[in-house]
């Protein structure tokens, strides 16, 4: 009888424990593969040199795959390499409308995540087409301008001989990028882009499209805005270093351009305070202007969070907010 009781207890324990353990494993499995599964798709909006893929190298190096491997859905639009944010924004709107229409009602809004000028482009879109936008996140975006753009437009003003020569070279490079990335955007306009990021241009753009920009120097912007009845969550993050690995060419480039900032913490293009928009998640990653999107070829500092992890964590943040 004693052996029978022991056997019955063991059977009951096994019967209860196995499903419980199976449920635990199933929960872990589901959490892993739905970690980045946002309600609305993520749209990665590029900055200048806005290619998606050239010669097998992605602008968002390995980031879309990192997000989608954990359950998220990602779109990468084709946008002009050099153009105003208004023009780029209109191209983006057309593509978002196309995605929404072709989804058969599956996709209604999007989480826009913009790098550099992509952040300003996304600001334009949320202002004029808030029905398309669930959230806007900018990274390394010079919302209040960049000393680099100020220097370039001062040394070679638009319309001068120097400016015409500079524009010819820049526009040719932009058009080549568009062709190589199979982008059918209009011709590049270097000064339409640069003119938005000097002192006068940035102030003018912010006066026309102020949503999300801090009202105090180096402060935070609003956590969200409501436009025509559409609530849009706002975030930003950025880096504060120019030389981060010592082994990739971007360190030389941004280590040089960073000298223009005269000691202000920056990523080589964007000052730490200029990066602020909406709720500032972090502004001092050990990342330069293109480390933030995992370039060059994933050569980033080992002393800070990997960019792919930053993106996955942000996708999960959006998921937890029901976005």
Image (cartoon, helix red, strand yellow):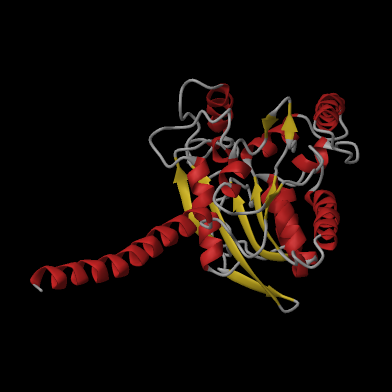
Could you tell me which residue is drawn at 71 percent across and 58 percent down?
123
- The single residue placed furthest to the bottom in the displayed view is 229
Nearer the observer, 68 or 134? 68
Residue for point 55% across, 44% down: 271
Q: Give the residue displayed 47% in from the left and 59% down from the top.
A: 31
> x%, y% of residue 164?
87, 28
Q: Position of residue 96 (x, y in %)?
A: 80, 57
Q: Quadrant of the N terminus?
A: bottom left
Q: Number of callouts in the render?
A: 0
Residue 17 lies, in percent from the top left, at 29, 66
Residue 219 can be seen in this image: no
Q: Quadrant of residue 133?
A: bottom right
Q: Position of residue 110 (x, y in %)?
A: 70, 61
Q: Quadrant of residue 37?
A: bottom right
110 or 84: which is nearer to us?
A: 110
**From what the image shows, is residue 265 above or below residue 127?**
above
- Rendered position, 43 above or below 40: above
On screen, residue 242 versus residue 55, left or right, reads left
Visible in this render: residue 174? yes
Q: Residue furthest left?
A: 2
């Amino acid at each position: 009888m004693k052996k029978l009781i022991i056997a019955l207890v063991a059977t009951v324990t096994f019967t209860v424990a196995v499903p419980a353990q199976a449920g635990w494993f199933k929960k872990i499995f589901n959490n892993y593969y739905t970690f980045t599964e946002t309600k609305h798709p993520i749209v990665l909006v590029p900055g200048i040199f806005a290619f998606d893929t050239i010669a097998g190298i992605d602008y968002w190096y390995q980031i879309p795959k990192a997000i989608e491997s954990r359950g998220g859905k990602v779109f990468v639009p084709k946008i002009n390499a050099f153009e105003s944010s208004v023009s780029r924004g209109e191209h983006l709107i057309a593509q978002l409308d196309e995605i929404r229409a072709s989804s058969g009602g599956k996709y209604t809004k999007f989480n826009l995540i913009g790098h550099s000028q992509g952040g300003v482009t996304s600001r334009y879109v949320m202002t004029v087409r808030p029905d398309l936008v669930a959230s806007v996140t900018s990274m390394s975006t010079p919302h209040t301008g960049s000393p680099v753009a100020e220097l370039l437009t001062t040394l070679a003003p638009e319309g001068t001989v120097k400016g015409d020569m500079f524009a010819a070279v820049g526009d040719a490079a932009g058009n080549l990028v568009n062709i190589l990335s199979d982008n059918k955007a209009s011709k590049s306009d270097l000064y339409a882009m640069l003119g938005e990021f000097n002192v006068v241009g940035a102030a003018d753009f912010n006066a026309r499209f102020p949503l999300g920009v801090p009202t105090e120097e180096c402060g935070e912007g609003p956590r969200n805005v409501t436009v025509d009845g559409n609530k849009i969550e706002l975030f930003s993050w950025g880096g504060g270093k120019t030389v981060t690995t010592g082994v990739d060419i971007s360190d030389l480039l941004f280590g040089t351009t960073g000298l223009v900032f005269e000691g202000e913490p920056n990523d080589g293009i964007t000052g730490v305070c200029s990066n602020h928009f909406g709720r500032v998640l972090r502004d001092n990653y050990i990342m330069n202007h293109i480390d933030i999107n995992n370039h060059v070829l994933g050569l980033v500092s080992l002393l800070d969070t990997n960019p792919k992890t930053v993106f996955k964590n942000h996708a999960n943040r959006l998921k937890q907010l029901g976005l």
